[in-house]
Amino acid sequence: MVAIVAVRAFGVGRGLFRYVERLVGHDAAYRVLGETRAQITGRLERLAPGGLSSQRKGDLLARLVLDVDAVLDLWLRVLLPVAVAAVTATATVVLIALLLPTAGVAVALAVLIACTVVPWLTAKTAARAERKLAGARGEVAASATETLLTAGDIVAFNAIDNVLDSFSTSDSRLAAAERRSAWSAGLGAALLVLCVGGASLAGLVLGSTANITGAVFAVLVLTPLALADVLGGIPAAAQLAIRVRASLDRVQELLDTPEPVTEPETPLPLPHGRDLEVKHLRVGYADHGDVLNELSLDMPAGSRVVITGPSGSGKSTLAAVLLRFLEPRDGEVLLDGVDLAKLEGDQVRSVVGLLTQESHVFDTSIRENLLLAKPGVSDLQLWKALYRARLGIFVETLPDGLDTMVGEHGARLSGGERQRLAFARLLLADRDILVLDEPTEHLDEETGRALLEDLFAAAGHRTVVLLTHRPELVPPHVPRQLVRLT
Amino acid sequence: MKPVDPRLLRRARGARVFLAASVLIGIASGLLIVVQAVLLARGIAGMVPVADGGTGVLRGDAGGGEAGGGVLGGGLLGGVLPGEGLPGEELLGGGLAAVALGLGAVVVGRALLVWMQEVVAQRAAAAVKSTLRRQVLEHSLKLGPVWLSGERSSALTTLLTKGLDDLDPYFARYLPQLVLAATVPAGVIGWMATGDLIAAGTVVVTLPLIPIFMALIGWATQAHSRRRQHALSVLAHHFADVVSGLPTLKLFGRAKAQESAVRRVTDKHRVASMSSLRLAFLSSFALELLASISVALVAVGVGLRLVDGKLGLETALMVLILAPEAYLPLRQVGMQFHASADGVAASEEVFRILETPLPERGDRTDVPDLRVSRLQLYDVTVRYPGRDEAALDGFDLDVRPGEVVALTGPSGAGKSTVLAVLLGFVELERGVVVAGGSAADEFEPTVWRRQFGWVPQRPGLRMGTVADNVRLGRPDASDDEVRLALIAAGASELELDKAVGEQGQLLSGGQQRRVALARALITDAPVLLLDEPTAGLDPDAEAAVIAGLRASGRTVLMVAHRPALIAAADRTVTVGTRELVNA
């Protein structure tokens, strides 16, 4: 009776202990998670855009959000319960061994099985299913993302049923993988019930032959049953450990993706001159043939170079090299005689700016989108940039003005408005060399012409490299060098 | 918060089957728990003679040269059946063997039930998630692209994967535990009542406190869990935005700052999570305390009655072993509820989407043939949510069969919106679309849309091949037909089996547009709705496309910027008067 009351009192203490343990454990785990996420972002920063383009966006997202979350699981649902189980189980074994050594051995055996065979069995049977699960999850995420992104096309062409059927194919692969992993989940838990029950049974059998008091006998029989609570988390932890490992492996894979550009160990100082020279350039993407070959160009400071050519002739690839997003296979790009490869990417990009046909607009306010080009500037300067990009009047008509939220990928702006916002941002950044990759793509003829007119005017002493398949839009009075890529 | 969301059972057949199986398993588990307690009580009581607490007496009684089993058996029987005085070593040995065997059988039985429960639960969870994923995706598509753009596709993706995976603990832990919480206490109290009515009464009185407290706590934590879910989706969205914007950030030398920005956002998420978890942990601690006190109450009563001699040792032990079992399942329901709260929140989000009503449309299937009927827009006005200004204001249009009409006007004037109106993607604030004398919204939407082939401003191409993408327009098209459509779209250089990456990657912008054009041309639709179909094309390709369009003989309504395209039209309609461009 005393023992039972004591157990109750201990129960209260245990509750308190568990409260503190969970709180501290969760806090620590969330901190680790934040750090990992930040590190991953840091790594992605070095990979983008060259190292990322080959991956499916949905998959990439699934990796970031789900796989990095696995760090949380590792702490909370693998390491923490295992540690708690180890401490409690050891204490129990010691207690019982002191009361009756043979029963202690039996309980130790049960704990040993629960801590080794159970997780091993769970892990072993679950491993294959789990590996498939991680892949299938990514596939479902990618398929869902794609379906949602192409929703308009799907609905317009009455293809909802077809698309859902193909979604269901990857979805049922995931469901099947989940069903398979179900068999192993239960196995570990069942074995655990056997271990705990077996320990109690051993206490009963061994205790009944030993010379002990009834109270001690009750402890021998009943205490092992209490272990069920503590050891209960082990099969789940083991199974999760597999999933976590698969996730962490994929995070590692992302971390191991080769960088598209090697930064020099000791970068040279940024030269003062702004003459740009392309010499015998040969460029291509990993595992693919050359996109540009033997390209040589001379772009003195302040010059205007219009590079034209059909789709796929390498205009955007050239832009990537000029921005040092991509390493040439051969040849070099010289800035005032210094090879770009001897400069850091950020140094290069503090001189060379880029406007693409699909500039990314962040899901925040117009103000924040502008400020990322030049933090801390006054509203007056923001408005100036907006007016120079011919977006000023539009923003003034918006009820929230500069604080207007632009939506995901700038969805609340039209294509032209998005492009002008990106242009205003570039003007604000004030780069000496402007690379413009099809800037007039989504604009009508007249606006496009006006935009280029303004752009060349605003460029002033800066070098302008315009990549376009519509060279006829370039204002006739602009002296230019025309280069045709094939 | 209801214990079981009836919508989940209604929407997913897998959930109903599972619940039925769980009830059976729960009843069996309850029975085995009672049997186990009875056996344990019998075994322990056998070692403790009623007279005094020592086992020495036992040993003395058994005496002689009997083997261990016999000695033990005698002791046990002495305790269990003191008054019956059954003689004979054989029977005495059988007492222990029976208890041990019985206990062994119970343990094996419980192990089997645990395993079955887990398998059934996981399978049910997989089936239910799969059903919900498809239903949500289907309903989102039916709600249309405009609704989706507001809903944020990446938040929806998170819901469909991570969000729904949070339902796993709901099925694997919470629901079975809920069933156990109903079956086990009932069995336990019932059996207790046969031995000690007062103890059973104590349990009956204290037991309801647990669900009452739980309901209060659940009510208090639900808002927190919602907030946590919200924080999760904000975080996912932030990640998606940062990742796709990294090249841009790099351009402005701001990418390196993202590391700390992500750290900051995640830290905010941590603080939000911790505040909801602190409450959850505290509540489970409170429940544990409540159960402990209740069991102590039972124990004290039993102890007093035992001393008074009003209660036999075996019965007392049985009651003491069973009492915690009555509280445990209820308490665990609380714990499992917290573990599955995220899943519940996710499922509520799912039902919020599924219960969003679809726009009302008619069911007429006799859409007039637009090869011969006119298409008219009267006073059409469209306003997008969150925008003060109308995207399209009192717009009129009359298109005769076979006409090629160019829509011009400054960016943002509503040209693309005109096409969206015809496709039924947007709700009209005012005005009407008329085809052959009937209002468009009288027709069943899929039949109506069959009249149109569409090339959006940003075509959404899907992973697969060029031919796969073209066949979205007509799934049963032969290779030759696909090839002809590509030629008509000015994309003769594209191989049918050329791979298309996610979001059209591996194709240039111009190629994507031409594949989208081929996709529209391959339909039998009498009307083509083209949003800048030649953007990104060089003049030669553009000329080829225009020739293809004219040759098709179909009605064409196209958003046009470029002079070559405008020149190819029969007439030009200017959309909107909003002045944006001139500063």
Image (cartoon, coloured by chain):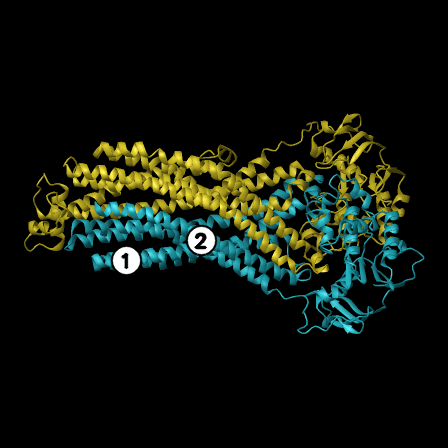
Chain colours: A cyan, B yellow
Label 1: few (<14), some or many (≥20) within 10 Å? many
Mark 1 or mark 2: whose residue is earlier in sequence: 2
Q: Residue A115 versus residue A390: which sits nearer the camera? A: A390
Q: Nearer the viewer, residue B375 or B33?
A: B33
Where residue B184 sits, quadrant-wise, is top left
Q: Residue at x 34, y 36 (%)?
A: B183
Q: Residue sitting at 51 percent across and 56 percent down?
A: A71
Q: Secondary structure at mark 1?
A: helix
Q: Which residue is mark 1?
A: A93
In the rendered structure, the answer to whether residue A220 lies left or right of residue B271 reads left
Q: Identify the element where label 2 is drawn.
A: helix
Mark yes or no: residue B524 visible. no
**What's the distance in space between the residues labelled 1 and 2, CA to CA?**
27 Å
Query: Which residue is at the far top?
Result: B437
Q: Amino acid at mark 2?
A: Val
Q: Split into 4 quadrants, where in the image is the C terminus of chain B?
A: top right
Relative to A272, residue A199 above or below: above
Please name which of the two marks, 1 or 2, marks the residue nearer to the observer: 2
Q: Position of residue B142 (x, y in %)?
A: 65, 36
Residue A116 as seen in the image, left or right of residue B399: left
Q: Where is residue A210? Give x, y as percent.
A: 16, 55
Subunit of label 1: A
Q: Answer with left or right where residue B182 lies relative to residue B402.
A: left
**Image coords of residue A161 (percent x, y):** 63, 40
Q: As drawn, is B18 to the left or to the right of A433?
A: left
**Same chain assignment for discs 1 and 2:** yes
Of the pair B548 and A164, the residue shown nearer to us: A164
Would residue A319 be visible to someone looking at this image? yes
Which chain's residue wears label 2?
A: A
Above or below residue A388? Residue A283 is below
Say which mark, if any, is on residue A24: 2
